Image: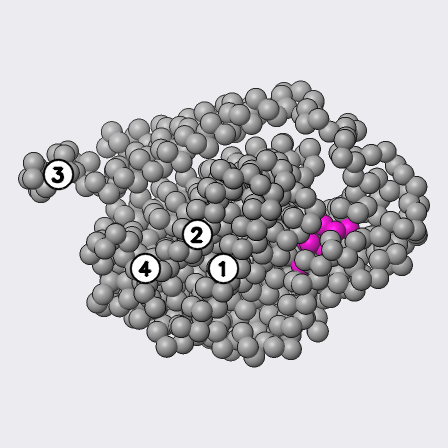
Amino acid sequence: MILAVTVGVLTAGGVYLLLQRSMVRAVFGLTLISHAANFALLASGVPAWRGEPLADRTDIAVAADPLPQAFVLTAIVITLAVTIFMLAMAVLGHDDDQYRTPETGEAHQQ
Amino acid sequence: MNPALLLLIIAVPLFASAMTVIIRARVFERALLLAVPVFVFVFGIVLLVYHQQVPVIAHSVGGYEDGLAIPFVSDTFTALMLTVTSLAAFVCCLFLITTGEDQYRFVPSLVLMMLSGVYGAFLTGDLFNLFVFIEVMVLPSYALIAVTGTWRRLGVGRMFVIVNLLISTILVIGVGFVYGAAGTVNIAGIAAIGHVSPQLSLAVGFVLVAFLGKAGAAPMHGWLIRSYPNTSAGMMALFSALHTKVGLYAVYRVYTAVFGQPAPWAWVLVALVVLTILLSVISAFGEHRARNVLAFTMSNGVGHILIGVALMTAAALSAGMYYLIHHIITMAGLLLVLGAIEQTYGTGAFKKLSGLARREKPATVLMVLGLFSIIGLPPTSGLWGKVGLILASASADRPGSGIIITAIVIGSVIGLMALQRMWSNTFWGKDMTIYHPDSKQTGRAPATELTDDVRIPNRLLMPGAIMIAVSVFLFFGAQLVIPFTQRAAEGLLNITPYLEAVLGHV
C-alpha cells in the first residue's frame, strides 16, 4: 500500500514538473517519474520477500526475487545517463523563458 | 547453423563502434560504416535462406536453461527486417559519407552503436532486453540529432529526448507489470501460458502503448513530425528507416505472440489505424518545407503498417510486412533525393525552391517515382503495398475492415493532393534566380545568384537512386519478396516452432 501511494505521489509530482516550461524542471519531473517506475518494478517482485537472493544463505521461501532488482538497476543506469545528457542540453540550449536563439556558431536570422 | 552465431549481428556493430572511437582515421571509419551494414545484410540473406528449412533458431545466452536465459531468436520476420534495415542503413551511410556528415564528431561510432541496438531489438526474445536494446538504439540518436541539421535541432532535441525518455519509462513500467502478471518477461514464456488474464492484458497494453509511441502512431506522432525534419536529411532517412520500424516490429512481435488472435480491444487498433492514416495526410497541408511534408507521409505509412496487426489474419500480416519493407525503402529514397536537393540549393523551403523540374532532370525522375511509390501508383512497390492491404482487408472477416479500406482510399487521395502541393511548390513554378548555398564557415551564406553550372552532383543523387531503383524493382519482382512475408506472417500466427526453439518444449 505504501509502495503504491509512493508511486502515485512520485508520478503526480513528476507529471506536474514535466508540464512546466523550464527544461531543468522537466528533467526533475522525469527523474521523479523514473523513480516511480523503479518502485513499480520493485513492486512486481513481491515486496514482502526481503531476504538476500542467495541460494546458500537464505531460505527460498523468504528470498527476494532478484530479477526486478536487476531491472531496476538497468533502468537506473539508463535514466541517469539520459538525465545527465538532458541537463547538458539545458545548459547548451536557449533560455526557455525568453526568446533567444541558441549559440551554435552558425549565422542565422531571427 | 549454430544459433550462437546470431550474437555476431549485435557484437560486430558494437565492436566496430568501439573501434571507431579508438582509431580516428577517416578511411577506417568510413570502411566500418559501410562494411557493418553489408555484413548484416549478407547475414540476413543467409538467414532468410536457412529459415526455409529451419523456421526458427534460438540461442540462450550464457548457456543457462532455456526459458530462464535471455534468448536471441531469429525467424523469417527477423531475418527480413535485418536484411531490409541493413540495406537502408548502408545507403544512408553512403549518403552521410558523400555529404561529409560522417566527419562530425563521433558520428560513425554513434551510427554503428545505433545499428547494434536496432539489430538487438530485432533479435531478442525477452521483453526487458527489448527495452534495453531500444535504449541502446535511441541513446546515440539523442547525440546524432544534436550534431547534424539546422540550429532548430537544439530546441527539438530537448523535446525528442524528453518524449523518448517518457515513452521508455512507460515501457519499463509496462514490462514490470508484465512480470508481475505473468511471472516472466520472456516473450515465448508469456505466449506459452496460453490464456491471457485481464491483468496480463492490461500490462501488455501498457507495453504496446509505449511501442506505438515509439513507432509514431497517432495521436503520439507529434514528437516525430516536429523533430525529424530538423535534423539533416541523411540522418532523417536513417532514423526513419530504423527507429519507428523497430517500434512497429515490436508491436507485431509482442501483440501476435501474447494474444494469438485479435484482442478483445482490437477495435482500438482499427481506430488508431484510421486516425493515423487520415490525420497525417490532412496535417501535411499545413507544412512549408518539403521534409516536413515527408515526415507526415512517414506517419501515414505507420498507419498502413499497423493494419497488419489490427486485422491479424495471415494475409493482413503479410501485406503489412510488405508495406513495412516498401515504406523503409521508399522513405529512405525520397529523403535522400530531397537531401541531395537541400545540400545543393541550401534549403527545402517551398518559398525558396521553384522550377526544379526544368533544372534537375535526374532528380525530377527520381522524385516522381518516389512520390508515386508513397501514394501507391505503378511502376513502384507502393502499388502492391496498398493493393495487398486492401485485398487483405477485404478478405478479412473482421469488424472494421470496411472502415480500413475506406481510410486507405481516402487517405491516398488526400495524400496525393498534399504531395502534389509539395511538388508544384518545389519542382514547378518560375525558374530560380538566387539561392542560399551552404557555406563552410558560417553554415549559411547570403543569397547568391544561381548560375547554370549549379547542379546536383550525381554522387549525391546516387544513394537515393539506389533506393528508388529497389522500389521499382519490387514492383516487377514482388513475387520474390511476397513468399518471405507470407512465411513470416505464418510464423507469427503459428507460434509453436517459435516456442519449441526458445523454450525447448511447447
Label 2 amino acid? Val
Label 3 amino acid? Leu
Question: Residue tagged by mark 3?
Answer: A54
Report, in whole angstroms, how far the alpha carbon at label 4 lies from the one at label 2.
Answer: 13 Å
Which residue shows up at 39% across the image and 45% down it? Answer: B132
- Residue B324 locus on image (x, y percent): 55, 63
Residues at discs 4 and 2 both on one chain: yes
Residue contact at pointers 1 and 4, CB within 8 angstroms: no
Question: Residue tagged by mark 2?
Answer: B12
Q: Quadrant of residue B191?
A: bottom left
The numbered mark, 4 or 2, whose residue comes first in the sequence reads 4
Question: Residue tagged by mark 1?
Answer: B39
Please provide the residue range marked out in magenta: B333-341
Which quadrant holds the N terminus of chain B? bottom left
| Tag shown at residue B4 | 4
Residue contact at pointers 2 and 1, CB within 8 angstroms: yes
Q: Secondary structure at mark 1?
A: helix
Which residue shows up at 84% across the image and 58% down it? Answer: B360
- Chain for numbered disc 4: B
